[in-house]
Amino acid sequence: MDLNSISIFLIVCFSSFIQSITGFGFAAVSAPLLLFFMSPNYVVGLTVFGALVSNFGVLYKTKGKSDAQLIWPMFAASLVGILPGVYLLRIVDASILKLCIGFLILLMSLSMAANYVIKIKRIKLATICVGFVSGFLGGSTSLNGPPVALFFMNQQQDKETLRANIVHYFCLANIATLLIMYLMKTIDTDTFKQSLYVIPGVLIGTWIGEKVFVKISPVIFRRTSLTIIFFCGTISIISGIIKLLA
């Protein structure tokens, strides 16, 4: 195994570790690092596939702890939001989008860190709106995770319920993403075959993360989740600035 393969293995392992603890963040952590070792087109497929495998590894641990009445409407709304997100990307400069959304994510994560809570009276309507925004951001910037994570954190759910809801939502979202990518011919079966070698790293990272999740306190869990969200916003801003300067 050469140095390049070892680096990819460690990145995938660490990203799976983080996602196993929080339920999201595989792509946010792995994508910027993997770009140093492989082409962007391959990174997109690998991160979605890796995130799905990692979530499958946690799925059985969260059985019966998620709220299907929230997850399914949220997922359905996210599918509706993808198309306008893709359309907006065609008419608005991607760098401007990344900057604006990045700053918004940072602002929301800082508000959550300050324990600011928005009281939501119509939960189902809010769930649909969050799902739509998640799909919209996924279609325009690939940042579909932060809105969902922030919504469930705002509901002040315990760490088991929070992770279960996030994992179940993103299992559905990742499957839908892979299908859409396949139908749009932005990913092919060869990509899946080439992604198989990262599965051991995903499983190891997921296994270690599961062991850590049981022991960490709700406070550490919340801080870790907010750190990942803050990281997503920061990467989005940096990416937008780089594209503007280019």
Image (tube, rainbow, N blue to C red):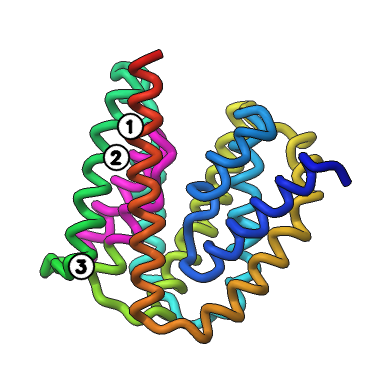
**Residue displayed at 28% across by 53% down:** 130
* Disc 3: which residue: 123
Residue 146 magenta-drawn?
Answer: yes
**Residue displayed at 61% across by 56% down:** 52
Q: Mark 2 falls on what kind of element?
A: helix
- Residue 191 percent across, percent down from the top left: 74, 36
Q: Mark 3 falls on what kind of element?
A: helix
For the residue carrying disc 3, how many other residues have a C-alpha within 10 Å: few (<14), some (14-19), or many (20+)? few
- In the image, which disc is placed on residue 98? 1
**Residue displayed at 64% across by 51% down:** 11
Amino acid beneath label 2: Gly
Amino acid beneath label 1: Lys
Residue 193 occupies quadrant:
top right
Amino acid beneath label 3: Ile
* Disc 2: which residue: 102
The mark that comes first in sequence, 2 or 3, is 2
Magenta residues, dominant SS class: helix
- The residue sitting at the top extreme is 246
* 33 with respect to 234 (left or right): right
